[in-house]
Image (cartoon, rainbow, N blue to C red):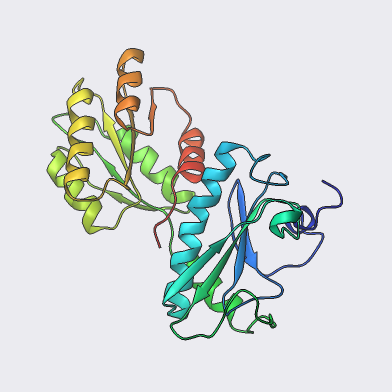
Amino acid sequence: MSDCVFCKIRDGQIPSAKIYEDAKTLAFMDINPLTRGHCLVATKAHAATVYDAEVEDLKAVMATVKKVAGALRKALNSDGLNLLQANGAAAFQSVGHFHMHLIPRWTGDGKGFDCERGRPHPDDFRVVRSDMAERKIRVVVAKPGLDGHDRGAKIVARALRDAGFEVIYTGLHQTPEQIVATAVQEDADAVGLSVLSGAHNYLFKRVLELLKEKGAEDIAVFGGGIIPAEDIRALKAMGVKELFTPGTSTQDIVRFVRDNIRAAV
């Protein structure tokens, strides 16, 4: 939208202290912060309010909110956080583009929501941006079971590494227990399984079960192999995020990880 301030920030027409950006969202420091670290997370696609925004864009905003919130707490040692989101003039929305305010709070900070707002702290942009930039998406690539063909897995691992992700390749003949232990120990954001043995139904299900048992169900699971379409549907219903079949471009896999896997903070 040509006259939207946030669209102009998105397009680089207006300068901003940008701390994070992905395919669907943008995070930047508030120009009139209520507290130190006060920042905004906005959709990239223009939508005036929550009523207008696409569901997938709203999901992406909340994922970015979690990422930025963790970085704020780590960088500023805050005690709490207010999330504020307004829709329409009656709700005091000042910019007609969907966004959420993240406002760090400290015990006894004396801040209400009717207090005078100040100027950005000069260190906030640097420390928050620096903290977020340090954490890359971390992917465990594994070959479970008796399958001894790992050329494809190595090609995928190399493509992900070349794309800027951290990759831990487990090698051949890994059990689901070993794979999950590695994912938890390495603080992985995702596990990619390469299965050509025909045991995909058991192996994917078992990895999902073990991640849940370890309280690590936030680690996404994806994979590939010679998998019939009906099994792909069943595995996705079970919780596998995506499955790739032979002939898939490595760029499609890289694109999936970049658009769907988010680094923990």
Residue plotted at (21% across, 58% down): 185
**255 versus 64 height, above or below:** above
- Closer to the camera, 102 or 234? 102
Tally the numbered discs: 0
**187 versus 174 height, above or below:** below
Could you say which quadrant of the image residue 89 lies in?
Answer: bottom right
Residue plotted at (17% across, 34% down): 206
Locate residue 230, reporting x and y percent.
Answer: 33, 13
Could you say which quadrant of the image residue 5 lies in?
Answer: bottom right
Locate residue 144, reporting x and y percent.
Answer: 19, 35
- Closer to the camera, 201 or 80? 80
**131 versus 54 height, above or below:** below
Locate residue 38, reporting x and y percent.
Answer: 59, 72
Outermost residue toward the front?
Answer: 90
Specify the quadrant that holds the C terminus. bottom left
Residue plotted at (30% across, 17% down): 231
Is residue 64 in sight in this rendering?
yes
Could you say which quadrant of the image residue 120 lies in?
Answer: bottom right
- Closer to the camera, 207 or 224? 207
Locate residue 136, reporting x and y percent.
Answer: 44, 59
Quick check: 51 left or right of 131? Answer: right
Residue plotted at (44% across, 78% down): 78
- Closer to the camera, 245 or 109? 109
Is residue 174 in sight in this rendering?
no
